[in-house]
Structures are given as structure tokens and as C-alpha cells.
Image (cartoon, helix red, strand yellow):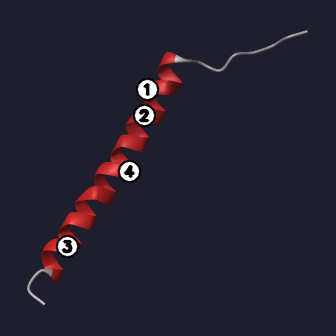
């Protein structure tokens, strides 16, 4: 299979990109919108 290695690299790159985007998004959201406290 000649195309097997290329497909594995593409999937690995896509997964790394997805995890990086998720962690960056979480960081930005936690900085931009601090937790709101509702005190009675």
C-alpha cells in the first residue's frame, strides 16, 4: 500500500491540530470570561 503512510500522517496532523485548537480555545475562554459568581 503506497498511500497508507501518507494517510496516517494526514490523520496524525489533523488530530494534533484539533487538540491544539481545543486547548487554545479553552485558554482564551477562561481568560476572556472569568467564572461568574452569584452571591445571595
Q: How far, Cα to Cα, is label 2 from label 4?
A: 10 Å
For marks 3 and 1, the one nearer the N-term is: 3
Q: Which residue is mark 1?
A: 28
Q: How many labels were placed on the picture?
A: 4
Foreground mark, 3 or 1, reads: 3
Contact check, label 4 and label 1, Cβ < 8 Å:
no
25 sits to left or right of 12: right
Tell me if residue 3 comes above or below residue 29 in the rendering.
Answer: below
Foreground mark, 3 or 2, reads: 3
Q: Which mark is residue 25?
A: 2
Please identify the quarter of the rendering in which residue 36 is found: top right
Q: Which residue is mark 4?
A: 19
Could you say whether the residue bearing mark 4 is in a helix, strand or loop? helix
Tell me if residue 33 comes above or below residue 22 in the rendering.
Answer: above
Callout 1: few (<14), some (14-19), or many (20+) C-alpha neighbours within 10 Å?
few
Question: Which residue does the image show at 42% across and 43% down from the upper left?
Answer: 22
For marks 3 and 2, the one nearer the N-term is: 3
Q: How far, Cα to Cα, is label 3 from label 4?
A: 18 Å
Q: How far, Cα to Cα, is label 4 from label 1?
A: 14 Å
Q: How far, Cα to Cα, is label 3 from label 1?
A: 31 Å
29 sits to left or right of 1: right
Q: Which residue is mark 3?
A: 7
Amino acid at each position: 500500500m503506497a498511500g497508507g503512510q501518507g494517510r496516517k500522517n494526514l490523520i496524525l496532523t489533523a488530530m494534533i491540530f484539533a487538540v491544539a485548537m481545543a486547548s487554545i480555545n479553552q485558554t482564551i475562554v477562561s481568560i476572556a470570561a472569568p467564572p461568574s459568581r452569584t452571591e445571595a
